[in-house]
Image (cartoon, coloured by chain):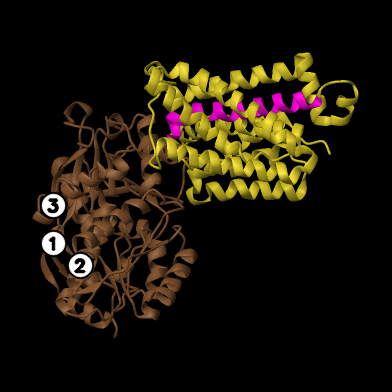
Chain colours: A yellow, B brown
Amino acid sequence: MDNLATTVAIQFFNGLVIGMIYALIGIGLTLILGLLDIPNFAHGALYALGAYLLLQLVGVTGSFWLGMLVAPVIVFTVSVILERFMIRPLYPAGSNYVLLFTFAVSVIVQELIIILWGPVGFSILPPQALAGSVDLGPFSYPRYHLFVMIASLAVILGLWLMLERTRYGAIMRAGIENKTMVSALGIDIYRLFTVGFGLGASLAALAGVLIAPIRGLMPYMGVDILPFAFVVVAVGGLGNVIGAIAAGLIIGVTQSLTTQFWPQGSTITIFGVMAIILLTRPQGLFGAR
Amino acid sequence: MLGIWPFTGAFADVGPVLDRGMSLALEEWGYKVIGRPIKYVKRDSETKADAATRRVEEAVETESVKYVIGPWSSGVALAVSEVAKRRKVLHFFSGGTEDISGKRCHRYSFQWAAHAYTAADTVMKTFLRENPGAKRWYLLIADYAFGWSLEKYLKLVGEKYGVTVLGADRHPLGEREFSGYVSKAVSARPDVVAMVNFGQDAIQAVRTFYNFGWQPKQPLIMAWSAGVEELVQLEPEMRENVWVGTNFYYTLDTPVAREFVKRYREKYGEPPGYAPAAAYGMTRLVLRGIEKAKSAEVPDVIQALEGWEGEDLLGKMRIDPKTHQTLRPYFFLKCKKKSDMKDQWDFADIIGTGDTPQPAELNECADIGSL
């Protein structure tokens, strides 16, 4: 019995780690969905871009920490420019065009990755300081995995504080709830969209950076993760940040625990859960409509 | 001749190198055989049965394709094999499923890769020779035709060598999240974990085992690997104490292999792995078959290949006329520590070969059929 408890505990930790990554990606996606009203099909590609930029920065500077901080900033800048000069002009044409454009971006970014780094995948080692395992008593657990949990938590907390406690955060939340009213109050709604898009994109990039030593890099990693990102958003509620966090963790833990008892069903179960929730509570677990 | 290769999908990284292997063989023959020009038709299998069969049908229909080489996925291959039988075109495949030369055998399809039994036997026998005490094994299997075949034979051969299989978990093809599987395997406390998976799945699994501290303290086996193509995507630290079973490794010392590796390296700057070697090897056999038959008619070539025996890429090779299985050696490697690597491609050494064929009584090919 003790062995089973230990195994389940390990699986639970695994679930939290991947769940945090799902949460980060999900928050970014749900922010963009809530603010700009578009499902960002380029989200997976931005996550992949974050990972590949990390690879490049580590290769050039030798520092994982530097890469981890700079890669999301680069993606923020790139996506802000993208939104301001390519997506914004499409708003009058309707959300379908914006959606198509994000899809085009995802393909372009993926092919660019192949052109720049090749079709063959890479591995990246965690930084020396985070190598090896930590003895947690009943079992050992990889240090880097624990770091991912803690770092993601810190970022999510910081984001939550920004959204709940700062004026700009309040504006952003209002923008998700009612764009027209926010605009009527004299706030530049388009500038809000740009920042929101950049923020969402950099969260995806950060997720890619954090997961790189765990999952490695592959040009199609964006395509691989996108369905999970959408599941998180659907289960959590569109535009709902708390929902994305909860959903990410639920999905991650579900996936991990299912692997223990029914390996073949681990991926099916997630989509099954999403299907059930969409049928019974379409606004998501935390959605309010 | 049709090369049905995965240029997209789960095995997308293998398509281009398979193409290279086949092209190299055709180049050597000058794109001509028995005085007639060879047209090399390429199609994307997408690693999906429906897309691949559609494209093979189309190629047979519109390009008069008579010889089909590929695909790469065992699952897709079984579907393509059906098309070959119906269309009466020669089909040569290299992959882990035993059904091509077993349950689903027919006159038109041939298997180049070592039989799953041969592979399992070589892997277990050689590993135990180097690690005699490692009697408790845990298996991680990709959940499709190729995985099932090797799982079955690892368990069977295990009985012969006194090995206990503590557990065998199946993961879906294309899985990326291995933490769960790794934790489960590790907590069973086996002496060795043996994986039967391929491509990105295998790479990700090795990576995850490493992250959880399995290797280098404990051994990890990749029972059926592409060799170079997979090992290059891992860091040397992740490869330490990893043992690899494969159908081809570039340090193989036969005249044909040496020449092939030399030309491949000159042209592409990197050594070939199992995939391009298989494409190269299969193309060579088909061409040799055409030469021997002195005819490009499919039935003549098939008859020329049945019972064919000779020295080729892998050394002594023979095609069993009853099952169309190529009898040839399988190789077992041990990966090198970073400090022992002479250059960036010096991943491993071949430490053993095995060519024990599947026992005849286990073969399920009741009747290879007629032309």
Q: Position of residue A122 (x, y in %)?
A: 38, 35
Three-letter code for the amino acid on which mark 1 is drawn: Asp
Asked whether disc 1 touches disc 2, contact meaning CB atoms under 8 Å apart, the reply is yes
**Number of numbered discs present?**
3
User: What is the chain identity of the residue bearing mark 2?
Assistant: B
- Camera-side residue: B216 or B302? B302
| Dominant SS type (magenta) | helix
Residue at 33% across, 75% down: B66
Mark 2 and mark 3 lie on one chain; the one further toward the N terminus is: 3
Q: Are marks 2 and 3 on the same chain?
A: yes
Residue identifier under label 2: B285
- Camera-side residue: B247 or A236? B247
Q: Quarter of the image containing the N terminus of chain B?
A: bottom left
Q: Judging from the image, what secondary structure is the residue with disc 1 in? A: strand
Horizontal side of residue B249 vs B40, given as left or right: left
Residue B323 falls in which quadrant of the image?
Answer: bottom left
Q: In this rendering, is residue B77 above or below A23? A: below
Three-letter code for the amino acid on which mark 2 is drawn: Leu
Residue identifier under label 1: B312
Residue identifier under label 3: B259
User: What is the chain identity of the residue bearing mark 3?
Assistant: B
Residue A47 falls in which quadrant of the image?
Answer: top right
Q: Judging from the image, what secondary structure is the residue with disc 2 in? A: helix
Is residue B302 in the magenta section?
A: no
Q: Which residues are magenta?
A: A189-218
